[in-house]
Amino acid sequence: MGRKSQRKNAAMFDSDDDTSSVSSSSTMPSSERVLNDDVTVHKDALLDQSLDSLYEKRSSTREQALASIVDAFNSDLQHEFVENKFATLLHQCLHCIKKGSTKETALASHVIGLLALTVGLGDQAQEVLEESVTPLSQALKSGREILKITSILECLAIITFVGGTDPEQTERSMQIIWQMIHPKLGSNVVATKPSPAVISAVVSSWAFLLTTVDHWTLGPKIWQETVAYLSTLLEKDDRSVRIAAGEALAVIFELGTLEKFSAEAKGSANGSVKEGTVSQESLVHMHGLKSKVTKQVRELSAEAGGKGSAKKDLNTQRNLFKDLVEFLEDGYAPETSTKVGGDYLQTSTWYQMIQLNYLKHFLGGGFIKHMQENEFLHDVFSFTPKKIGGGKLSNDEKRLFKSPNSALNKARTQFLTKQRMLAKNMNIGHYAATETMEE
């Protein structure tokens, strides 16, 4: 058995200054509290002004307004603004996606994703998803620009991650995303060769949503097609594509689906499983695919740097595939530690690490703020940050977001139950993989 990987997350966020600069309202002088209230009022007025500007005819004006809204949602959790202007903001952003320029579509897509993360679990997140999925799908089919496509893909992944309470909703979004590069699984696909950036975005977004899917959902045929396709991506010249494919494969193998198929095949041979389960021939083929992937991953973990290759990207690839080799051979997932203010956010599974990296990428400069104050993200990662301030929620906000009887808390209970079941399934897959190799 190999050692258990304890690679630290390379992107450590040093935000101790953030914690030291935030004072508790209980100890803050009255003059400072008044000043802070004035600043808050000013920021709210700017947000209202930006929302009004989305009605302007000039595209550049709408782009500036959307950029301001993105900055505001990154710098703080705009609960009060969302409570009052949720529907207006959502529908104006969808209008920008339908009619706007590439830049406008990209910004509007990002705002919708931030809106979903801000409202968290509940009816509003589901409304964001159901109202947006058709316009986003249509925009993907008509889009050609890389920025437009990748922004819409990320938006669809984020709003599904938050608002997709039913497996059918998640699978629908995953199919829309996958069809951008692999039309065999669906129709109505733009028949053009996707760029490496689009392939990378598709695979990363698809894998991000796969982390929320129960391991019983993937059938043998889809498993084989998907793994075979991702295996071909490991041979592509573009390093970002290879990395995205490696992460997707890690999630697939961590789900323990292959071990489930093996159990079904044994049961079928003994006559204890009904007809329609995986055949022995298919099972042999799937294990052959896993062996092929393991060999590819081992080679990529030791790849030498070529001319003009970025050292950072090369190191990222090597680290990822070293961890993946160890997982495929010994069953150990990498552990990561990311600094958030005065705390460390720990991950110990592939699915947690991939969720964290995707959300970190999407939030960008707003990651620390959201990770410290966004209760939805706290639930996702079972993360409880140190309290760095007081009096952040108004009475209305406390009623909406803290009450045990609120829709948000009821949805949170359902979400946590799903997370516990998913973690349990991941652990079953992990131990099954280890036992299979030991046999």
Image: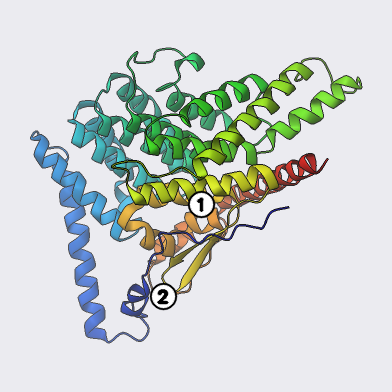
Q: Is residue 14 above or below residue 209?
A: below
State how many labels appear: 2
Q: Quadrant of the C terminus?
A: top right
148 or 225, which is in the foreground? 225
Q: Which mark is residue 100?
A: none
How far from the left and from the top, in percent, is residue 28? Answer: 31, 84
The residue wearing badge 2 is 388
* Dot 2 amino acid type: Ile
Rendered location of residue 257, percent (x, y): 69, 33
Residue 319 seen anywhere in this rendered image of the structure:
yes
Q: Is residue 21 left or right of residue 355?
A: left
**Looking at numbered disc 1 in the image, what kind of residue is underneath it?**
Leu
**Coordinates of residue 57 in the picture (x, y in percent):** 9, 33
Circle 1 residues within 10 Å: few <14, some 14–19, many ≥20: many
Q: Is residue 399 left or right of residue 421?
A: left
Colouring rule applied to residues: rainbow
Tag 1, which secondary structure?
Answer: helix
> Which mark is on residue 408?
1
- Could you tell me how far apart the alpha carbons at marks 2 and 1 are, in whole angstroms? 23 Å
